[in-house]
Amino acid sequence: MNDTLDLLNQIGAGAEKEAELPERSIEEQRKIVAELKRLEEAGELTPELLQAYMTGEKTVD
């Protein structure tokens, strides 16, 4: 029983550490995808830019 409780506590602690991603509308998601495709085709897409768009640090105006 204690093992199960310890496991549940560990899972709960891990969930608290995860960053919450922003909720985006379908239209905003489409704009982001279009921008990422444009950047990729231009050879300007970097892992840092991709992460910024996915985490909400950067948005499409």
Image: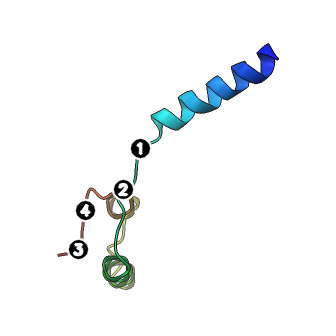
Whichever of labels 3 and 2 marks the residue nearer the N terminus, that label is 2
Distance from Cα at disc 2 to Cα at disc 1: 9 Å
Distance from Cα at disc 3 to Cα at disc 2: 13 Å
Amino acid identity at mark 4 = Lys
Query: For mark 3, what is the residue?
Result: 60
Q: Quarter-wise, where is residue 37 in the image?
A: bottom left
Q: Position of residue 29 (x, y in %)?
A: 37, 76
Image marks 3 and 1: residues in contact by CB distance under 8 Å = no
Mark 1 closeness class: few <14, some 14–19, many ≥20 residues within 10 Å: few
Amino acid identity at mark 3 = Val
Q: Which residue is at 36% across, 56% downward?
A: 55
Whichever of labels 4 and 1 marks the residue nearer the N terminus, that label is 1
Q: Which residue is at 55% across, 27% downward?
A: 13
- Left/right of residue 47 with respect to residue 8 in the rendered view: left
Mark 3 closeness class: few <14, some 14–19, many ≥20 residues within 10 Å: few
Image marks 2 and 1: residues in contact by CB distance under 8 Å = yes
Looking at the rendered structure, which numbered label has been put on residue 19? 1
Amino acid identity at mark 2 = Thr
The kind of secondary structure element at disc 3 is loop
Q: Which residue is at 31% across, 82% downward?
A: 31
Whichever of labels 3 and 1 marks the residue nearer the N terminus, that label is 1
Looking at the rendered structure, which numbered label has been put on residue 55? 2
Q: Position of residue 21 (x, y in %)?
A: 39, 54
Distance from Cα at disc 4 to Cα at disc 1: 15 Å
Distance from Cα at disc 3 to Cα at disc 1: 21 Å
Image marks 3 and 2: residues in contact by CB distance under 8 Å = no
The kind of secondary structure element at disc 4 is loop
Quarter of the rendering occupied by the C terminus: bottom left
Query: For mark 4, what is the residue?
Result: 58
